[in-house]
Every structure is written in C-alpha cells, then in structure tokens.
Image: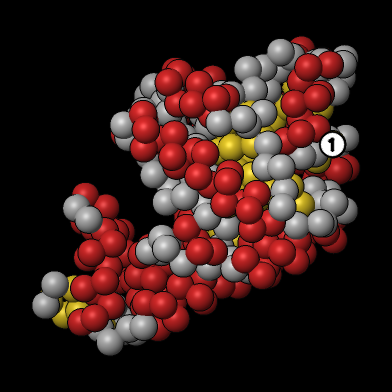
C-alpha cells in the first residue's frame, strides 16, 4: 500500500465527531466550492449486507444521515443547473452539493426520490433510456436477483452452490467479471434459459419505467438528464456511434417526457472512458454540461463539459469519507495514485 493510500485510510478511520472541524478549516482555505456526488442504486440498511453486489448500492440509512449532516453544516443541495450557475458566480463562502443517480433503477423511484423529498432537497436522475424502453439487458441486476433467490445456479452447464451471502457475493463477482469480458447480453440470455428465468419479468422488477419517470417529470425536486441509450463506454465507440448514443438518449427523453434535457453524464466516466472528443460531442448535441466520475471539486469557472463527480458506493458509510470528498482530499489522492 502506498504512503498516500495509508495516509488517506488513517484519516478516514478517525472519529466522525472530528470530521467537521477539518471541513471548517477547508472552508477558510478554499472558499467557494461545489461537490458533485453520484451513485447507482440504494437499499435499506437491513438489506444491504445480504446483497450479492452490495457495493453497487448506497446504504439508505447512511444517505439519510449524510443529507442531514450537509443541511446542519451549511451546504446547499442543488440541481446541476444551479451548480453551474453558482460555479460561474463563485461567491465567497458558497458551498454546494449535487446528488445524481445514474442509470435509474426502480429503487430510484421507490426509495431515493422519496428520501430526497423528505429532506426537501433536489436530486438529479441521469437516465439510460434503454432501461425504461426495455431494450438494454440489465444483466447485472438479473444475475444478482437469481443469486439472491436460489441456493444453486447453473452457469454454462456447471452447477454452482451459493447457500450463503458470502458465496453469493463471490459468485456474483466471478460470473459478472467473466461475462463483462465477452458479450454479457448473450451470456445472460443463456443463463436465464438454463435456469428457467423470465428475463423480461426480471427487467420489469428492477427497471424504472416511463410511467415512473412521468410521475416525477414535473417534480421541482427532480432534475432529469441523459446517460446514453445503452450505457456504452463512449470513448470506445466510433465518432458516429458515440454521437448517436449521446444525442439519442436526449432525443428519446425529450420525445417521451417533453423535457429540455440539458445535462449529460458519461457511463463509467473515468479518463479512459471519455475525453476531449467526447466532451465536444456532448456540446455539439446541444447539452449544457457533461459529468464524468473523475474525483474533485467544482470551482469557479469550471468547464461544464468535464464536471468532476465523486462516486459513493455501498462501503462508503462514514461521514468522514463524505467529508474527504467535500474537502477535495479524495480528488488529490486519486491524482497521486493515478486513479483518474
């Protein structure tokens, strides 16, 4: 482990009651700043431990605590629209946070949006339009669901025993990594067939539908942006295909919901997943911004087409780590470690 990683781990292990003074000191040093958070799914605390892919889910209990903490310590929770306005102004002492949910699964509608409503703060939904359209195989969610429900599964003709939560997690990690290398959609379809699983029913169980999006489209606390059609890694595509993914998701959302759709988020979002060509394509498609998953803070005159976002995953259940994002420490560590 590098010295930078050791230092970060030691800092995060500190008592949470010491966290805010460190943040207050950063307020004096940095002045105006914004922090954009992102995550994919959320689950109740009591269910989180049993999930085979639990790091993909944010603990709802922690998210509830984090939203309360931000309010108590003077952070404004805002939309991407408002974050860009504040970035341009750069007013002294202004501190703002945005939360965005990528892809948009059913739990976004059933659990995440209601939690933000209870706190009276906005949330941004970056929608992969293949999910409500039913055209994108949700193989990760389907694999996890089957593992959760069964003690034995068949993969490529081989039976795997998965009676415990730990064995289910191990199986998910191994199978998903293998599928991700070679045609996951085809392999998931074969998995569903050999295990007698209705893939369409699984999709409906986990997907956020157009009806759900219709129900939140006029909510002043919900901002809707685009996240491609098929969750493609944009940098890996030819220019015409990349442009189709970027513009196609916006066109579909505008067609179906009648919204302007001003903001875009890159799937995966790290340095190897999107770059200058792709930022230009988003601008050309008519968006006002593009978000990455490169850690860091939003400062005055931030380029709106390469917004940094700090990913929250299931194991992030300490306010100390959130404060590390809010102070910019994780962004510095990521650059030192080459994780950009």
Q: Position of residue 224 (x, y in %)?
A: 68, 48
Where disc 1 sits, the SS reads strand
For the C terminus, the image quarter is top left
- With 11 as the anchor, is 334 left or right in this view? left
Residue at 46% in and 67% down: 134
Q: How is the image coloured?
A: secondary structure
**Farthest left residue in view:** 157
Q: Position of residue 51 (x, y in %)?
A: 46, 69
Q: Position of residue 240 (x, y in %)?
A: 37, 33
For the N terminus, the image quarter is top left
Residue at 11% in and 77% down: 157
Q: Nearer the viewer, residue 161 or 187?
A: 187
Q: Nearer the viewer, residue 169 or 95?
A: 95
Task: Please determine whether, in this image, residue 211 is positioned above or below residue 241.
Answer: below
- With 30 as the anchor, is 156 left or right in this view? left
Quadrant position of residue 189:
bottom left
Q: Decide if residue 168 is in sight here.
A: yes
Q: Nearer the viewer, residue 222 or 152?
A: 222
Category of crowding for the residue at label 1, using alpha-carbon neighbours closer than 10 angstroms: few (below 14), some (14–19), many (at least 20): some
Q: Position of residue 43 (x, y in %)?
A: 60, 66
- With 255 as the anchor, is 117 left or right in this view? right
**Farthest bottom residue in view:** 196
Task: Please determine whether, in this image, residue 106 is positioned above or below residue 278.
Answer: below
Residue at 71% in and 64% down: 214
Q: Nearer the viewer, residue 39 or 265?
A: 265
So how many labels did they put on this image? 1
Task: Please determine whether, in this image, residue 222 is positioned above or below residue 319.
Answer: below
Q: Which residue is mark 1?
A: 76
Q: Decide if residue 153 is in sight here.
A: no
- With 104 as the anchor, is 178 left or right in this view? left
């Amino acid at each position: 482990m590098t010295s930078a990683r050791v230092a970060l781990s030691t800092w995060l292990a500190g008592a949470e009651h010491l966290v805010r003074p460190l943040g207050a000191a950063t307020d004096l040093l940095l002045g105006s700043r914004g922090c954009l958070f992102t995550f994919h799914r959320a689950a109740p605390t009591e269910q989180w431990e049993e999930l085979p892919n639990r790091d993909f889910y944010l603990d709802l209990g922690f998210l509830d605590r984090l939203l309360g903490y931000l309010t108590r310590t003077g952070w404004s929770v805002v939309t991407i629209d408002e974050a860009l306005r504040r970035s341009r102004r750069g007013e002294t002492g202004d501190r703002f946070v945005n939360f965005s949910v990528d892809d948009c699964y059913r739990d976004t509608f059933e659990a995440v949006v209601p939690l933000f409503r209870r706190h009276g703060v906005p949330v941004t939904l970056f929608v992969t339009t293949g999910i409500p359209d039913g055209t994108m195989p949700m193989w990760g969610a389907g694999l996890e669901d089957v593992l959760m429900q069964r003690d034995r599964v068949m993969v490529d003709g081989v039976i795997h025993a998965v009676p415990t939560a730990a064995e289910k997690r191990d199986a998910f990690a191994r199978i998903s990594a293998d599928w991700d290398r070679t045609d996951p959609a085809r392999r998931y379809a074969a998995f569903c067939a050999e295990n007698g699983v209705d893939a369409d029913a699984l999709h409906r169980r986990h997907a956020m539908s157009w009806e759900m999006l219709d129900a939140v489209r006029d909510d002043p606390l919900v901002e809707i942006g685009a996240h491609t059609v098929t969750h493609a890694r944009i940098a890996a595509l030819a220019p015409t295909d990349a442009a189709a993914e970027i513009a196609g998701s916006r066109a579909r959302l505008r067609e179906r919901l009648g919204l302007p759709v001003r903001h875009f988020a890159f799937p995966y979002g790290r340095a190897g997943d999107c770059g200058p060509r792709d930022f230009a394509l988003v601008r050309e498609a008519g968006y006002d911004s593009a978000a990455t998953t490169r850690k860091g803070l939003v400062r005055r005159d931030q380029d709106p087409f390469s917004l940094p976002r700090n990913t929250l995953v299931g194991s992030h259940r300490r306010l100390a780590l959130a404060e590390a994002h809010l102070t910019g420490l994780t962004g510095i560590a990521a650059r030192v470690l080459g994780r950009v």
